[in-house]
Image (spheres, rainbow, N blue to C red):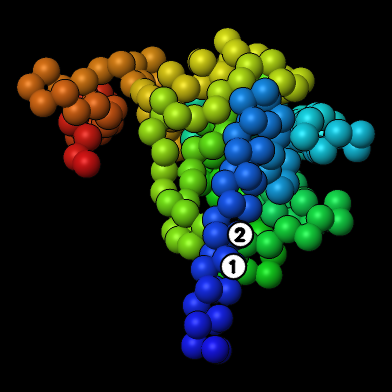
Amino acid sequence: MFAYTFPKQSMFNEAFCRDTSVKIRSQLEIKRRRGDFTGAFAVYGYLKDPENKNHLVADTYAADVVRDIFRWKMDGISAGDIADRLNVSGILAPMDYKKSLGMRFSTPFRTHTHACWNAATVLRILKNAVYTGVLVQGKNTTPSYKVKRRIVKPCAEWNIVKGTHEAIISPDDFEIVQNVLARDTRTSPGSSTVELFSGIVYCGECGASMIRKTVPSEKRNTFIMFVRRIK
């Protein structure tokens, strides 16, 4: 009798788990399509609305930091230098800032007791359209409730809804920053402004970007030339 009952019960349990998974996925998809935020934690610069956990509201302090990051990038400052500025100023990195607000935030990628700003963190902020009031969700999924390995969905299947929350960065400024990132512009050491031809001059043969190189001569005259950047 037990040999017959156990497989039958196991089949019922598996069917229940499958149905529950389908229902949860369907509900999350409905929420994402109508512009509800479904993440566990709000992105840096925002907080979950106390009256509606599916709505984002601007975090006054962190939002100002985000604005500074975008402004510095538009001035041509590299992501690494921006991270250094934030660290020197004592600005808490997103991970530690969330914890300072009492959030039980953790990540398996943490390697130090105190998190610091780095270029990767700055770039994630600069490339995130959420700061323009747009929610982009549903980028990743799992094949089934049994398989926990996450896969990236095609862009056409992402849930993108505009005007879901207050914008911290204007669409125009966001577009400018994306163009700056695409051109890979940066300030030279000891300079506070972007070079005139930064991100504009390319090799006519291979298309690689060119960099400015100063060559001093014996007569103390300086020659400036452009050389191909080796990747």
Counting from the top left corner in percent of width and height, residue 131 is at: 66, 26
Residue shown at 69% from the left, 54% from the top: 95
Name the quadrant containing residue 108. bottom right
User: Image check: 215 left or right of 101?
Assistant: left
Q: Residue furthest right?
A: 51
Name the quadrant containing residue 161. top right
Residue shown at 91% from the left, 37% from the top: 50
* Quarter of the image that includes the C terminus: top left
Q: Residues within 10 Å of mark 2 (few under 14, many from 20)?
A: few
Q: Is residue 54 above or below residue 144?
A: above
Q: Which residue is mark 2?
A: 16
Counting from the top left corner in percent of width and height, residue 137 is at: 57, 34
Residue shown at 50% from the left, 77% from the top: 7
Name the quadrant containing residue 213. top left
Q: Nearer the viewer, residue 201 or 3?
A: 3
Q: Is residue 118 above or below residue 224?
A: below
Counting from the top left corner in percent of width and height, residue 49 is at: 86, 34
Q: Is residue 84 above or below residue 207?
A: below
* Quarter of the image that includes the N terminus: bottom right
User: Image check: 6 left or right of 151?
Assistant: right
Q: Residue furthest top?
A: 172
Q: Are marks 2 and 1 in contact (CB under 8 Å)?
A: yes
- Kind of element beneath mark 2: helix
Q: Which three-letter amino acid code belongs to the residue tagged 1?
A: Asn
User: Image check: 157 left or right of 107?
Assistant: left
User: Image check: 143 left or right of 128?
Assistant: left
Q: Which residue is mark 1?
A: 13
